[in-house]
Image (tube, helix red, strand yellow):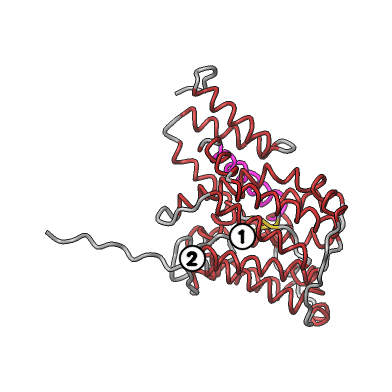
Amino acid sequence: MPLTATPPPRPRIRFDRNELAGAFGDLGTDLPLLIGIIAASGMDSAGVLIMFGLMQVFSGLWYGMPMPVQPLKAFAALVIAQKIPGRVIFGGGLAIGVSMLLLSLTGLIDALARLVPKPVIRGIQFGLALQLATLALKKYVPADGLAGYVLAAAAFLVTVVLLGNRRWPAALVVLALGVSYGLLFKLDFATAHRAIGLHLPGWQVPTWDNVKYGAILLALPQIPLSLGNSVLATRQVVEDYFPERPLSVRQISFTYGLMNLVNPFLGGFPVCHGSGGMVGHYTFGGRTGGSVVLYGGLFLVLGLGFSQGFQQIVQIFPLPILGVLLLFEALTLATLLRDISGSRSDLLLALLVGLLCSGLPYGYLVGLLAGTALYYAMQRGWVGLGK
């Protein structure tokens, strides 16, 4: 009787065209946030970009899977809306780094993970999918008028035809289309020339007042989103895509905290892991830590050599292309609902949580708390959403 061949284990790090294609799966989320953060806060762009790149490289090497690093979204929204200065951002980053590290080291994060049921986690992911799709279709795709719509339609068709193709990765072809368009129609050579020059991050020391105000203004609104999406939902995506390499929520929250104990002292913006980012890398070909390392390398090059003209240089890349990448990331996130589709009550609960997360102020906190309470009420027969 022939023995069944055991499939070879996936490598932890690989560099090939598919990993390179996967590296751009999260660009549509990160790039606009970083541009807005630098413009609103006055933070040194070299420090923001270099540290963002270094954290990607760290995460890719540490996990050996496409576990990307993202700017903290609640932080970013508040910074952009209120123009919060860098010194308060550094203090808030240090505060959330200490908080996440304590949750990990004490094991409290495990208790939270056991408490939050799977339909609620799927709902959080669905809420993120709704937000990403809305951003893609309402802001990015229409950004360049009629030419942008044509460009987006071409990119969409290319992605549909090539998605999953290992020989011609969809993201690389779409990015080549976007770069070609930008070079032909948007590049200002004078601006690009002035942007070139070596720059290094500066040393920063947050004061106690910076930490106190940063914790109140920034860290407290961020924690619910981080627990729901950065930790719990990311652990679920790892279980979905890499079942042979399970990760605990404690491991994920540990590196989350560790990164934010380093970032503030070298001018970096606070960061987290994220389920949407991992889905984006995986959707476009990333299967190892190599995609995240390559992604980090892009930001290191931008920070070290082009940081002074960063905002002007990135304007040459058409937003409709980023919108298409973001849309497919959102669609992939939404399809994760399929594993609870057999239970009508679980699916309806997940859809409800997603709508709360995407549609309300502090929606991720409301969705997490309300969804968990409703789940346990359903288990006890107090309420029903159908069988």
Tell me, yes or no, if residue 329 can be seen here: yes
Magenta segment main secondary structure = helix
Q: Number of callouts in the render?
A: 2
* Residue extending farthest left: 1
Q: Residue at x 50, y 33 (%)?
A: 347
Residue drawn at (85%, 59%) of the image: 87
Q: Residue at x 74, y 48 (%)?
A: 74
Residue bearing the label numbered 2: 288
**Which amino acid does the dot numbered 1 rest on?**
Asp
Residue under the image location 55 percent in, 35 percent down? 115
Per the image, the residue denoted by label 1 is 26
Q: Under tag 1, what secondary structure?
A: loop
The kind of residue tagged 2 is Thr
The reply, left or right, for residue 80 in relation to residue 153 is right
Mark 2 residue crowding within 10 angstroms, few (<14) / some (14–19) / many (20+): many
Give the residues drawn in magenta, as a range: 119-140
Residue 246 lies, in percent from the top left, at 45, 53
